[in-house]
Structure formats: structure tokens, C-alpha cells
Amino acid sequence: MDRTDAVRKKLQEMAEPAYRDFSAALVPGCANMLGVRLPLLRKLAKALDEESVTALLAEEKEIYFEETMLKGMLIASRRMPLEKRLELTAWFLPRIVNWSLCDSFCVSFHPKQEEREPLWQFFSPYAAAQEEFFVRFAVVMAMDHYLGKEDLPRTLGLLKAANTGAGYYARMGVAWAVSMAYVRYPAETLPLLQNRELDEETTTLAVKKICESRKTDQTQKNFLKTLKYTEKEETV
């Protein structure tokens, strides 16, 4: 048994059918899910030896959803030069075909201070891509790692310029990021919504998510609900 097959066997052993059935219902188009919980995948990513990591990342095709997820975790979190990490990230991006792969991949990054600027320069152009999950990748990376006060202006600029026309999950990614920015910095983020600097559906989705947050007080919620968006959009 080669190392890739050994990892697949381990994934099979970690699978929970009931968890698979629950999770697959939340991830559209994911028929190849085994049902391995994320903490177990992260634990496995840390435990794999270098030979197994090399073998996995050399494999062009994946059999299981969790195998793809594991590759993303390895690329984002294993110790390696940034240049190599970015090269592998570009290779991995076409494999992101749902929100779960995208969001777990993004949150697995832990950039060092000296890596923050080259990492931003790498991912930020993807916000203008035509591919739905390329756009989501860029906005979720900005949300996860560049939402501090010093990065806020360029992150809001990225969200404003993102190609939300690429698809629903691109729009939802922008809306999610805007809602997180608003909770932290309401005064700075409000113009994106109040001045309609985002498309109407994304504005609606963002307002909805902000109003669902327990960190948003009722006065803010009442004001946000007065923003101009149609009755049809309000039900999205």
C-alpha cells in the first residue's frame, strides 16, 4: 500500500456515516463525502510525515471530499517557504468547488508578519475573477486575516470591487465579510451599505447577516432595515 492509499484508508476509518449524511446536505454537489469531522482532519494534517505529504500533494486526482480538504489544510498550514505555499495554492484553487472547501482552506492560513503583504498581493486579484470560488477565496482570506484596523481600508475596497456577479457563493462571501467588518467597525463599514456601493442582492444579504448578529444592537438593526432594498431581496 502506497502512502496516498494509506491516508485514504485512514480517512475511511475516521468516517462517520451519520455525520456524512448531515454534512452532505449542507454542501451542494458533494457526493464523495466520507463524513470525517474537521478537528480530526486538522489533527491528521499535523500528524502526517513529510513523505506522506509529498505523496498526497503529488496526486492530481482526489477520490474523497476529505482528501481534497486535507490537501488544502496541508498547503495552508505546513511549514514551507511562502513562495512554495503560493505555488501550491494556485494549484489547489481549481479544486475548490464548494463553500466548505473554500472556507476551511482560508482559515487554515497563519501568515507570519513578513508574509502578510506578499500574501495579500497574491490573493487580492482573485476578487475580480470570473470563477465563483476564486472570488470567495479572496474575500474570505481578506475577512479571516486582514480585518484589523490597519488593513480595513483596503479590505473594504476589495469587498467593494469584488466580482459578485460570479455567483451566489461569491456574493454570500462578500456579504459575510461585510457583516464581520460592520460588527467590528460599524461607522467605517456603513457607507458600503448606505451608499449602495455593493450590488443590491449582496447589500440585502449583508444587512440580513448583520441583523442576525448578537453583537448588533436593536437601534442599529432598526436603522439597517430602513436601507433601500426590495421586498423580493429581503426574502433571500
Image (cartoon, grey):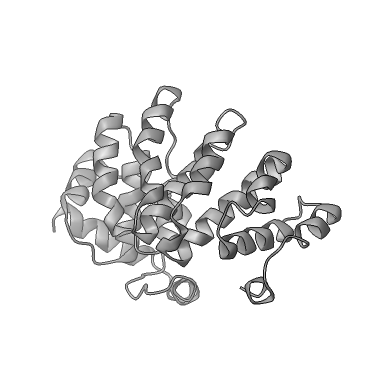
Q: Check the image and name the residue furthest to the top.
A: 114
Residue drawn 39% across the image and 67% down it: 15
**Image quarter (top left, top right, bottom left or bottom right) of the N terminus:** bottom left
| Residue 83, horizontal then vertical, whole percent | 26, 31
Q: Is residue 78 left or right of residue 140?
A: left
Judged left or right of residue 148, residue 218 is right
15 or 143: which is nearer to us?
143
Q: Residue furthest right?
A: 219
> For residue 102, what is the image quadrant?
bottom left
In this view, the residue in front, 3 or 90, is: 90
Q: Nearer the viewer, residue 118 or 49?
A: 118
The number of numbered badges drawn on the structure is 0
- Residue at (41% x, 35% y) in the render: 120
Q: Nearer the viewer, residue 202 or 21?
A: 202
Q: Is residue 112 visible?
A: yes
| Residue 160 in picture, x, y percent from top left | 53, 48
Q: Is residue 80 visible?
A: no
| Residue 151 horizontal side relative to residue 211, left or right | left
Residue drawn at x 68%, y 63% as measured from the top left: 208
Residue at image coords 52%, 35%:
154
Most extreme residue toward the left, as rendered? 1
Against 57, residue 67 (above or below) is below
Residue 166 coordinates in the image, percent (x, y): 40, 62
Residue 3, percent across and down? 18, 52
